[in-house]
Amino acid sequence: MKPMRHDVRVQMSNVNVGAGAYEGDGATNHGEHMDNSATKDSNKPTKPLSGSSYLQSIGAVLLLCALAAGFFVLFKGQPSAVVSMLARSGFTAAFALIFVSEIGDKTFFIAALLAMQYQKALVLLGSMAALSLMTIVSVIIGRVFQSVPAQFQTTLPIGEYAAVALLAFFGFKSIKDALALPDSSSGNLEGNSESGELAEAEELVKEKVSKKLISPLEVVWKSFSLVFFAEWGDRSMLATIALGAAQSPLGVASGAIAGHLIATVFAILGGAFLAKYLSEKLVGLLGGVLFLLFAAATLFGVF
């Protein structure tokens, strides 16, 4: 009987060895399968960083602007005359004020948010149509201040005084609001988005664009309507009215539209990227200083 027990034990051990060998082979095959899948995943192309594309787009726009400005100056041959002409026409003041006012504004983020969902060219077309129309309306309102009342035109420049007062008001208000910002918001525009312009723009876009826009005409119209009504009564609109009352309407209109165009292009190409690195406090202080400088220039021009 003892030899039989020994044979049974040997057979059971052989069965266990076979099972272990089977498990070992299965684990080996599973490991090879995991290695192959990992190799396939590693061979997949990786997407480029979005930040670099934003920087390249912004750099291209800045390069085009620099080339255009250089060509204009060289073509005229008299840089001082060109600068003097632009200063007298109101182009420089309108461009600087509008550009600084629009960076980080509600319309800036509306264009950026829409450009993330739809074709950028359509968003730019609708946004610029709204901003151009708003600029023309603002300049017309500014010219009305110079004609009413007409009997005071020869003795008291009411339009110029109103422009100085409005520019000075926005200058002091911008500086006051910027200094009141906490230090945590001085790092970027997005850091204070919970109660700032970005949060308002996100809420407005979510409310007004509740369904996916299909046709290009819908994208253009929605961009136009959102930007137009968000810009109505805004600081940049009132600044355009003030400049239109004090300086050449053609120069102010062209400078304001150019400022809107550059700011909107920045928003569409890299608004989300710029929001992470632009200082809200710095933008506010710079805008306030510019408002005060042009208010002083307008005041000295009156006298």
Image (spheres, helix red, strand yellow):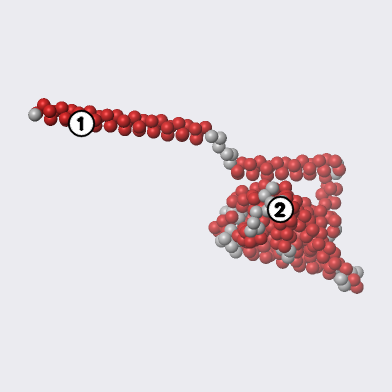
Residue at 20% across, 28% down: 11
Residue at 73% across, 50% down: 216
Residue at 81% across, 59% down: 136
Res 260 quadrant in image: bottom right
Answer left or right for 100 relative to 147.
left
Query: What residue is disc 1 on?
Result: 12
Query: What residue is disc 2 on?
Result: 219
Q: State if disc 2 and disc 1 touch (CB < 8 Å).
A: no
Specify few, some or many for label 1: CA neighbours under 10 Å numbering under 14, 14-19, or 20 or more: few
Q: CA distance from mark 1 to mark 2?
A: 76 Å
Q: Amino acid at mark 2?
A: Val
Count numbered badges in the picture: 2
Q: Residue 126: where, in percent of width, then height?
A: 74, 54
Q: Residue 278: where, in percent of width, then height?
A: 62, 52
Q: Of callouts 1 and 2, which one flags the residue occurring earlier in the amino acid sequence?
A: 1
Locate the N terminus and report the quarter of the image it occupies: top left
Residue 106: give its label. none
Q: Amino acid at mark 1?
A: Met
Q: Residue 6: where, in percent of width, then height?
A: 13, 28
Residue at 69% across, 51% down: 214
Res 149 quadrant in image: bottom right
Q: Nearer the viewer, residue 220 or 77?
A: 220
Q: Nearer the viewer, residue 199 or 241?
A: 199
Above or below residue 174? Residue 114 is above
Locate the C terminus and report the quarter of the image it occupies: bottom right
